[in-house]
Image (cartoon, rainbow, N blue to C red):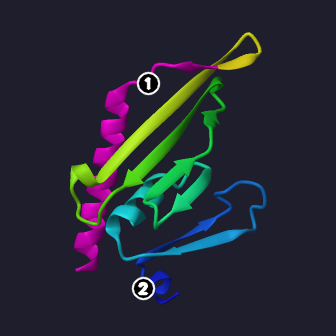
């Protein structure tokens, strides 16, 4: 609770879908984790496992493109702010002939998201010093 109050944690309200009154507090001073959760705060989350180093989003689509949906898997393999400690995998599908079909994902989008998380983590670390 103290880390949350000092700005070293994150509170997620309704991010897991369903009951929007539900609130989850995630307390960590690890800037990589905080940056990942803050960057993904608009996506519904299905799994947040600090000890396993993984964040998995639920399928997400926008109102402007309801026939395509994507989900993300983020793996955090260390606390040092290095590219080798962060991996983003994305998966997308299109709705065709009454079923969801996997589509090719632009791998560069994963790199762009990794860079965004790392840059945010660096800013968070600088703010905490």
Q: Is residue 113 above or below residue 8?
A: above
Looking at the figure, which quarter contains the C terminus? bottom left
Residue 86 inside the magenta-drawn segment: no
Q: Is residue 23 above or below residue 118?
A: below
Question: Image quadrant of residue 18?
Answer: bottom right
Under circle 1, the secondary element is loop
Magenta residues span: 101-129
The answer to whether 9 appears left or right of 127 in the picture is: right
Q: Residue furthest bottom?
A: 2
The answer to whether 107 appears left or right of 14 in the picture is: left
Q: Judge depth for marks 2 and 1 and give the one in front.
A: 1
The answer to whether 115 appears left or right of 18 in the picture is: left
The answer to whether 105 appears left or right of 81 in the picture is: right
Whole-angstrom CA distance, mark 2 to mark 1, is 38 Å
Q: Position of residue 34 (x, y in %)?
A: 41, 66
> Which comes before the other along the chain, label 2 or label 1?
2
Q: Residue at x 54, y 49 (%)?
A: 56
Q: Residue at x 36, y 32 (%)?
A: 109
Q: Position of residue 112 (x, y in %)?
A: 31, 39
Q: Mark number for residue 3? A: none
Q: Mark number for residue 105? A: 1
Residue in front for this viewpoint, 107 or 61: 107
Dot 1, how many residues are within 10 Å of its Cα: few (below 14), some (14-19), or many (20+)?
Answer: some
Q: Position of residue 36 (x, y in %)?
A: 41, 57
Q: Residue at x 34, y 46 (%)?
A: 87
Q: Residue furthest front?
A: 52
Circles 2 and 1: CB atoms closer than 8 Å: no
Q: Which residue is mark 2?
A: 6
């Amino acid at each position: 609770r103290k880390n949350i109050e000092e700005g070293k944690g994150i509170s997620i309200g309704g991010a897991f879908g369903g009951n929007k009154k539900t609130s989850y507090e995630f307390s960590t001073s690890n800037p990589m984790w905080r940056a990942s959760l803050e960057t993904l705060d608009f996506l519904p989350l299905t799994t947040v496992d600090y000890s396993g180093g993984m964040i998995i989003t639920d399928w997400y689509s926008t109102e402007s493109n309801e026939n395509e949906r994507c989900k993300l898997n983020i793996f955090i393999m260390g606390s040092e702010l290095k590219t080798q400690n962060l991996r983003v995998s994305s998966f997308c599908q299109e709705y065709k002939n009454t079923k969801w079909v996997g589509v090719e994902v632009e791998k560069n989008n994963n790199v762009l998201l990794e860079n965004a998380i790392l840059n945010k983590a660096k800013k968070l670390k600088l703010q905490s010093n």
